[in-house]
Image (spheres, helix red, strand yellow):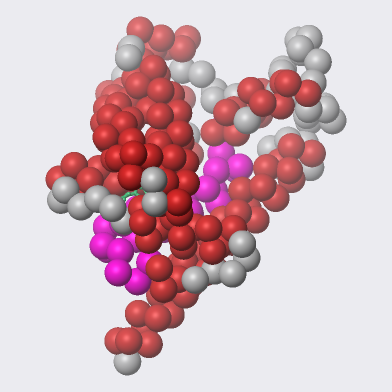
Amino acid sequence: MFDNFFTMFNNFFFIGLPYIAILLLFGGTLYRLFFGFKGAFRKMDWTSRGDFLWTTRSTGFFGRASIGPAVLCLHWGVITLFVTHLAGAVGGVLSLIVWVNFFRWVGMFGGILLLYGLIWAIVRRIVISQVKAMSTLEDYIVLIFLILITSFGLYQSAIKLVFGVTYSFAPWLWSVVKLQPDPSFMVGAPLVNKLHIIVALIFFAYFPFTKLVHALPIRLHIFGDHTFP
Ligand code: HEM
């Protein structure tokens, strides 16, 4: 009975969920770009300049100084983690130990940087009354998602000192990309790593419907005109 439950759990989270996340991440972005309820007023082109539904609803007017180092730590942390996860995925499939070690140590640095920025950002939203007044539920949900994902990652690598899951996670990811998902690669992964991946996939599915889409036009600007608005 427990075996059945465990297999269903593994199948849903490591076969179904990745595809749901990929579909919503890309489909949701396209929908939002051209048709979405939060994009109804946008111009039909590749930029989002002048489109206030795609901004982060900046709190700068009330608390520019209080955002302090958080904004730098957040963005550099995310960029570092993106690059290191990619290196870990490639290194894990091709058994490149240096790449996997790069993931471990530089990823840990990126994780600490990100977590510091996230905690600063959420405390600031709660403590500064003007920033709190203009915060929406979405502002908190996004931060809580990222705090959970980063904490699970760091708990595993910096506190439990478990590393090397990359060697099974990367072949699993590759099996998903090849459209031949094989959840058996993830069976032996520690629960905290499974939770890390599951919460991250749910977060990716939610991503296109949040203010975080402000990250995408950086690339879209490459295709579009740069005039404002
Ligand atoms: C917002 C998205 C994500 C964030 C912020 C994030 C953050 C982190 C952090 C901070 C670590 C610890 C890194 C280290 O100490 O070297 C980590 C490890 C890890 N992450 Fe993520 N992660 C994200 C998404 C994902 C996704 C989508 C996957 C898989 C599909 C994933 C798979 C892993 C694995 C397997 C490890 C541990 C590697 C090992 O033990 O070998 N992460 N992550």
Left or right placement of residue 153 versus residue 134 in this view: left
Q: Position of residue 169 (x, y in %)?
A: 40, 58
Q: Is residue 150 above or below residue 121?
A: below
Number of marks: 0
Q: Quadrant of residue 175?
A: bottom right
Nearest the viewer among 5 and 83 is: 83
Magenta region includes residue 54: no
Left or right placement of residue 38 versus residue 196 in this view: right
Q: Which residues are magenta?
A: 186-211
Q: For the view shown, which residue lies furthest in the right direction?
A: 44
Q: Quadrant of residue 142?
A: top left
At x 15% / y 51%, what residue is drawn? 160
Q: Is residue 122 visible?
A: no
Magenta region includes residue 196: yes
Q: Is residue 36 above or below residue 67?
A: below
Q: For the view shown, which residue lies furthest in the bottom direction?
A: 1
- Image quadrant holding the C terminus, namely top right
Left or right placement of residue 108 versus residue 58 in this view: left
At x 79% / y 21%, what residue is drawn? 224
Q: Quadrant of residue 197?
A: bottom left
At x 32% / y 87%, what residue is drawn? 3
Query: Would you say the magenta stretch is mainly helix, strand or loop?
Result: helix
Nearest the viewer among 135 and 81 is: 81
Q: Position of residue 14 (x, y in %)?
A: 47, 67
Q: Position of residue 67 (x, y in %)?
A: 36, 15
At x 56% / y 56%, what residue is drawn? 21
Q: Is residue 107 above or below residue 200?
A: above
Q: Position of residue 221 (x, y in %)?
A: 72, 21
Q: Is residue 192 visible?
A: yes
- Image quadrant holding the N terminus, namely bottom left
